[in-house]
Image (cartoon, rainbow, N blue to C red):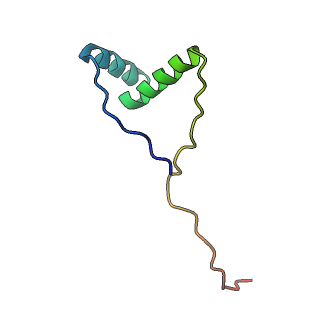
Amino acid sequence: MTAKKAFALRLDPALHDAVQRLADAELRSVNAEIEVLLREALGRRGVKVDRTAPARRGRPPAQADEGSDDA
């Protein structure tokens, strides 16, 4: 699983409130909304950012026993 990079971000309270309202309207977290806004802004500047594969959720697939003969 690829870990996301965590860092502190200081925002003007009015800017945070605006991002919060936008995130609420889009049913996203503030963090996810900031990611969307950054990707859009980078795209407008011609910077392509590849998406990493999302982490697989749920139980891992069962592995077959190598020594069993169920046939």
Residue 60, image x and y in percent?
Answer: 54, 62
Q: Name the quadrant of the C terminus.
A: bottom right
Name which residue lies at 51% across and 17% down: 41
Identify which residue, 9 or 58, lies in the foreground.
9
Q: Is residue 25 left or right of residue 68?
A: left
Against 14, residue 27 (above or below) is below
Against 66, residue 9 (above or below) is above
Q: Seen from this angle, which residue lies furthest right?
A: 71
Q: Is residue 8 left or right of residue 27?
A: left
Q: Is residue 67 left or right of residue 51?
A: right
Residue 34, image x and y in percent?
Answer: 41, 25
Name which residue lies at 53% across and 20% down: 42
Q: Seen from this angle, which residue lies furthest left?
A: 13
Identify which residue, 28 or 19, lies in the foreground.
19
Name which residue lies at 48% across and 25% down: 36
Residue 30 can be seen, yes or no = yes
Residue 14, image x and y in percent?
Answer: 27, 13
* Residue 15 image-quadrant placement: top left
